[in-house]
Amino acid sequence: MRVTKKAEFLAVPGLLFFLLTVQASLACEPCDKELSLEETADAADLVIVGQRPDYSPDETDPRMGGPPVVNVRVDSVLKGADPGPTIQAASWFGMCGYGIVIGGGTYLIFLEKNEHQKSAVEYPDYPFIADYLSVNSGCAVKALPVEGDYVNNEGIRVPVAEFARGLGLRGPEASGARGRTGSGMLPANAGALLA
């Protein structure tokens, strides 16, 4: 079978179109609008200080992202009902970090309750379902690092209690064995700081 120059000429754009279409369908969806910190705090069902007890620096593949669902130890609750000592939160969807993408360390984390037990993304037969999702499908503030008893918001360190009060959240009161933030216990007067 002989292929003519005309057939080769028509095949190249067709192949190029196919490859670009496949690539676009695999790309992460951009946000139409990303919520501000205040809008995120208002929209969140649950705001916690917590950390990943099973985090491993080897778990993230730059081409494929990380785990689809992560376990988060709840150190304190700043908004919402106490979910218990550990929750599961949606994290990566392939190479797209639509969920809560946190490493080692402690974070202030904003979450939505997964009321309908849907997957983190609208994708047929996606088997990974978590109890909590990122606010606004990840188009919001997801988490801020907590260092000691301070939230680090773009290089500005603010005490967790003051930061919570500024967002209209309750303070990080100790509850049972929890109530820890960062590496130290909250000060005994943490409740008074919120009054």
Image (cartoon, helix red, strand yellow):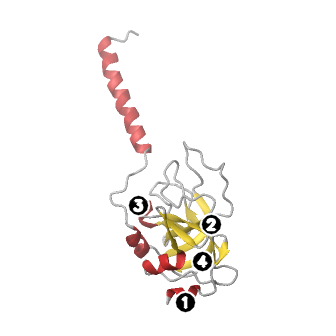
Residue 169, above or below 35: below
- Mark carried by residue 182: none
- Mark carried by residue 76: 4
How many residues crowd mark 1 within 10 Å: few (<14), some (14–19), many (20+)?
few
Residue of label 3 = 139
Name the foreground residue: 27 vs 49: 49
Q: Are marks 4 and 3 in contact (CB under 8 Å)?
A: no
Q: Are marks 1 and 2 in contact (CB under 8 Å)?
A: no
Sequence-first disc among 3 and 1:
3
Residue of label 1 = 192
Q: Quadrant of residue 178?
A: bottom right
How far apart, in angstroms, are the residues tagged by discs 3 and 1?
A: 34 Å
How far apart, in angstroms, are the residues tagged by discs 2 and 4?
A: 10 Å
How far apart, in angstroms, are the residues tagged by discs 4 and 3?
A: 24 Å
Q: Are marks 3 and 1 in contact (CB under 8 Å)?
A: no
Residue of label 2 = 51
The amino acid sitting under disc 4 is: Ser
Quarter of the figure with the N terminus: top left
Q: Are marks 2 and 3 in contact (CB under 8 Å)?
A: no
The amino acid sitting under disc 1 is: Ala
Q: Residue 25, position in %: x, y?
A: 41, 44
